[in-house]
Image: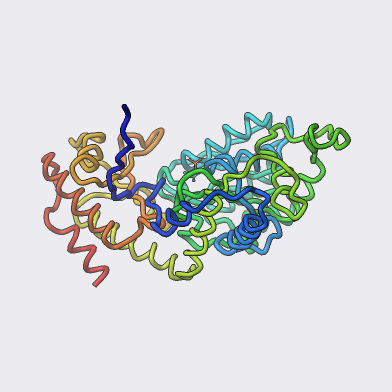
Amino acid sequence: MFKTITVPKRTIMTPGPVEVNPKVLQVMSNSILGQYDPVFLDIMNEVKELIKQPFGTKNEQAFAIDGSSRSGIEAAMIAILEKGDKVLIPAFGRFAYLLAEIAGRCGAEVVLLEKSWESPFAQQDIIEKVKEVKPKLVAMVHGETANGQIQDLDEIGAYCQANDVLLLVDMVATFAGVELKVDEWGVDIAIAGSQKCLSVPAGMSLVTFNKRVEKLIKERYQLELGLSKDIRNERFIQSNYLDLSQLMNYWNEERINHHTEATTLVYGVHEGLRLLLEEGLENVHRRHLLNNQAIVAGVKAMGLEIFGAPDTKMPTVTPVIIPDGVDALAVPRLLLEQFGVEIAGSFGELNGKIWRIGNMGYSSRHENVLAVLGALESVLIYYGADIQVGKAVKAALDVYL
Ligand SMILES: *Cc1c(COP(=O)(O)O)cnc(C)c1O
């Protein structure tokens, strides 16, 4: 016989998934509601409103999509891009290449603008490339979780708005951790996820888009055959499950039948967003900044170096350069097995070169910061790394006290 699973308690300090606020788990344990139950429809309507504030938008369209963050990215891309459309993707880290991968699968002509992963782009460099390439869409990442760098967007957005170019931004790692201004920056469509700073289990993506995108997807609208044989469209969106136009009409008052909604996750997203607003977005951002400051102070006090340009470092991720002679995999393994503390490695060219300490959502708490610093120091001592001993936790406490 199989036994009911036993799940150990962990201190999760990765850049996602992160610890979930117990209040969210509690709300998620409510009974299932039918997806057209009026009580559930009210919850959906509130979720639509709640999503807008952390994005900094007054867009009419804001809703959640079943699937992790990349489902929202894929839905956005496949709704906008048609075969042969040009898309410009400025890349300063791993997740830009995910955008390129998805755009390529949409049949778009992908133009990559690449640079070293140590810092983001000067906005003017991207604008120059937009002038040269004349793409339909610029797709980029706000916070690059793989290397911990954040990109300014306002000038790029202003240029795109003035020149009939659409701007799609992956805000997965910054939503609810950093102040976002989708409207002010001129972002046409933005995507976030549930399991990062929102601190809800993985499985939902959040998306908001403006009238320019709404107009475009309405032009491509095709209703499912099973509902009507009349609404056919030559330019139909290639995906059914991730069809933003049908999802929009399901989340809107029309309530046109589509997938079976993951009601439990919607409860979780509602509570996650509600808790953010209860704490106050400014306080939430300030908490992430303070804990970031403590993590950075602690890491530096050990004599370790932080990867990338300090001025453009994301407060939600700290990339730590792995010291010489230390086994990149052994350290996180011992941290998890003996301390119950989880940190992450990285991807691509940074794999084996940096560890990443996350500082996101419900995991962004003093006790977690102190736990990860104390445990990391102990593990590095155990493996004989050449570090400054006995200073990390003190440095973090000096930030707090
Ligand atoms: C985590 C992350 C993703 C992918 O998210 P999933 O939820 O795993 O699909 C995409 N972009 C960024 C910047 C991320 O941090």
Closer-to-camera residue (235/42): 42
Horizontal side, residue 395 vs residue 240: left or right: left
Horizontal side, residue 216 vs residue 94: left or right: right
Quarter of the image with the C terminus is bottom left
**Mark count:** 0
Up/down of 247 relative to 310, above or below: above
Point out residue 278 in the picture as x, y percentages from the top left corner.
48, 70
Residue 287 visible to the viewer? yes
At 37% from the left and 38% from the top, the residue drawn is: 346
At 77% from the left and 51% from the top, the residue drawn is: 254
Res 399 → quadrant = bottom left
Horizontal side, residue 33 vs residue 370: left or right: right
Point out residue 54 in the picture as x, y percentages from the top left corner.
55, 62
Extreme residue in the bottom direction: 401
Point out residue 23 in the picture as x, y percentages from the top left corner.
42, 59
Closer-to-camera residue (135/298): 298
